[in-house]
Image (tube, helix red, strand yellow):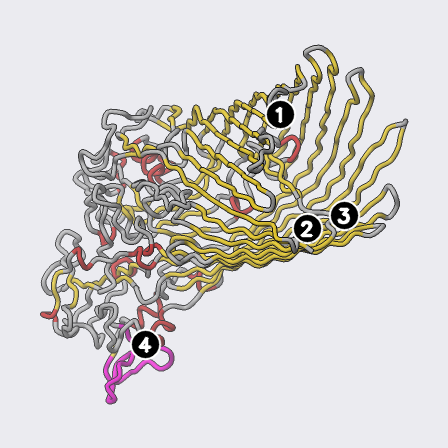
Amino acid sequence: ERIEILKDGASSIYGSDAIAGVVNVITRKNFDGGEANVYVGQYGKGDGDTETYSMTLGARGERGSLTLSAEYSKQDPVWAKDRWYSRDGSLGPNSTSATWSPISQNGSWCNPTQVDCSDSKQAVWKTLNAGGNPKNPNDYHVITADEFANSNEQMTLLTGVKRKSVYINGTYDFTDSISLNTDVLYNERQTFQQIAGYPFQSNSFGTPLEGSSAFNPVGQDVSFRRRLWEVPRTTDSQLKTLRFAPTLTGFFELGGKTFDWDVGALWNRNESIKTNRGDMSLIAAGQALGPSFIDAGGVARCGTSAKPILGDCRPWNPLLPYGVDSQGSLANQELQDFLFPTFTTRGVTKTTSFTANLSGSIVTLPAGDLGFALGVEHRKEEGSYVPDAFAQSGQSTGLGQKPTRGQYDLNEVYLELNVPLLADMAFAKELTLNVASRYSDYSNFGGTTNSKFGLTWRPLDELLVRGTYAQGFRAPTISDLYGGLSSSFESYIDPCGVKAPGSVAGNAACTAAGAPANYVQLGQGNLPCSTLPCQSGDQFVSGANPNLKPETSKSTTFGLVWSPRWVQGLDLSLDWYKYEISDMIIADSVDRILRDCYVLGNSERCSSVTRAADGHVSAITYGTANLGKMKTEGYDLGVKYRLPELAIGQFSIDWQTSYTAKYDEQGQNSAGDNIMIGRVGEPGLFRVRSNLGVNWQYGDFGVNYTARYYSGMKESCISLADGWCDAPNHMANGETDPLRHTGSNTFHDLQVSWKAPWDATIALGANNVFDHKGPLQYSAPNSAFAYYGGFDVGRFLYMKYTQRF
């Protein structure tokens, strides 16, 4: 029905999570009639097909109403290989980290009869010649960079999504003063994501191609590396949400005044089931790489001719390149089924809430009624994350996952007063004070009180002045606390490496951990990193943290709204804001942990780091944490103007601009002192964001134009070639790396519409109509690729049809 936006901290009114404001979506009620919508679209490259079909039906009677809405939508994935900035692993000609993975889909092995393959400095990796005999050790050549794996070829850029939802709202008037309102929602969302096949390294799991394998070219155990290209890693996720919210509402008269009340309950359940494929069973791999023989029929079998392995076992030849169909090839479906079982994880969150509210006016003051609202709430949050037995076993390339479970409950009470101070006076057409406070008692965090003070002053009929001060509070979600763990290959800089900026190689902490004074950071394939940051060859584990504390905030806003009488239809607004958030809940990082441990000497942080015998970081566990503080300050400018109707039609303008004057995050300098580091202009933290909308309506025809402006950005030059930094002498406070700047970007949207005489509306449109491309961002902000994730990925064309009846 409508959307309300509060830009100040609203925890005193809405409770936890309203730390910097609220977007309140008001759903339709008392809808009478019907409406059907069809929306179809796709990108100009012919991908990302999107379809949405919805219908809303409603009926009203003397004592109530019923509204039913159903929707189905589908968006096909967009593949990384189909966009210029993500089609390969290269970040462009100016990035020295533009390298592909040495763990190739063609496979490579190290001959133990020639070199010590356990020594990364001596190991020589060879891959099969085209058309060569995999059993002949002379039919292999040293792998070259041209044969490395471009993992982006198998990755999704935009996730495929399907949604189904049904929403029902019913109202019933028991009496003139008592009514029942009930909301029921069922929503189902399915998503599909894919990343490249696992970069398998036999040394990481102690699973060599054994000398007794029928596919071994030298008759000795050999180490090998192979990207499991035939079986990319996929995640099919299904999220089901069921929500039931009955509320009894009414009013009563007391002392000549009317009071409104409501008593309600909420039950909400989210169930997430993720099905994963592409992680190899280490038990099955050990059998497939172990003893095998060729039987009398010429078929490879597990075991030996004297003691064949009965049952489900398929020998594997990891030295066969992708696309070569021969015995032991990973292209064989039976071998894939044997090596790659699917596994599932199940997460459930539940919310149970009971509320009671009362509002009305207490007394009539000279300037108007003193209004109040008070209420109480009891809420319980529960959550669990349960991987299946295979996922928990740790016997896969995806590492083990542990089940988690937890809950907390809270009781809350709030009071809000709206106090009119002056009215209908010179330079005080209205002066109103708003005060609100909420006390929350958490079973796991204790008690907290958060308040808000707001003042509204209208010195003239056409001018409104407003200001607020508010405290905010955000409790960790059940997912933050008990959401489980996952693994990934992280890019990072090891300060114990001699090539790291500000290297501390050779200090006591590094040498005690096993990193020699001349240590060079190792990446995928245990090869020395040619550039930094460098991607790990080992999986690191990250996830939820049951020890999180709540975030707290303070916010101050001040603004003006001016609607000059001498320009009808013009509204101007200017708001200043300032927010400060403490104990921010953010994802910890490998870089932060290594810096704290080895540079700042925080021994507690070292406990999560494991190093291998050669000194490289082989394992690290981290998760969300309360890390530091954020301060931001800025201005929001709004211009709305509905021009007088002209012979050529009706024009209206809506221009909204946000200017961020300051955005600082707490960090530590090289001495370990807490300082605030300026972040404005870094990718995702734009100095200026501006949206300009222009609408023209002529009879039944309409045109909407929108321009979306993003100011320029800056990023660290740490991964760029020499000479590519355009600000080599400019470094933010506390930072040690020079900067690179990119220019501003504007995306243009256009829509034309027609209101048909049969009570329908047809619209055709294009988002990013000029197919504007944003700049490469080598730091890969909000994305796995060298591009800001909030920018458009191409021109999107669509059609929308609405039928009312």
Of tags 4 and 1, which is closer to the observer? 1
In depth, the one of 290 and 791 nearer the eye is: 791
Residue tagged by mark 1? 568
Dot 2 or dot 1: first in sequence order is 2
Quadrant of the rendered image containing residue 714? top left
Residue tagged by mark 3? 181
Of tags 3 and 1, which is closer to the observer? 1
Please say if the residues under marks 2 and 1 sit with CB atoms less than 8 Å apart.
Answer: no
Residue 788 colored magenta?
Answer: no
Q: Is residue 639 visible?
A: yes
Between marks 3 and 1, how big is the CA–CA gap? 40 Å
Dot 3 or dot 1: first in sequence order is 3
Of tags 2 and 1, which is closer to the observer? 1
Between marks 4 and 1, how big is the CA–CA gap? 80 Å
In depth, the one of 561 and 207 nearer the eye is: 561
Between marks 4 and 2, how big is the CA–CA gap? 49 Å
SS class, disc 3: strand
Dot 4 or dot 1: first in sequence order is 4
Dot 3 or dot 2: first in sequence order is 3
The dominant secondary structure in magenta is loop
Q: Residue at x 64, y 28 (%)?
A: 449
Q: How many dots with numbers?
A: 4
Between marks 3 and 2, how big is the CA–CA gap? 15 Å
Residue tagged by mark 4? 314
Where residue 4 appears, x then y in whole percent?
A: 63, 36
Q: Residue at x 70, y 31 (%)?
A: 414
Residue 683 appears left or right of 146:
right
Residue 310 colored magenta?
Answer: yes
On residue 267, the disc is 2
**Quadrant housing the N terminus:** top right
- The residue stretch that appears in magenta: 293-316
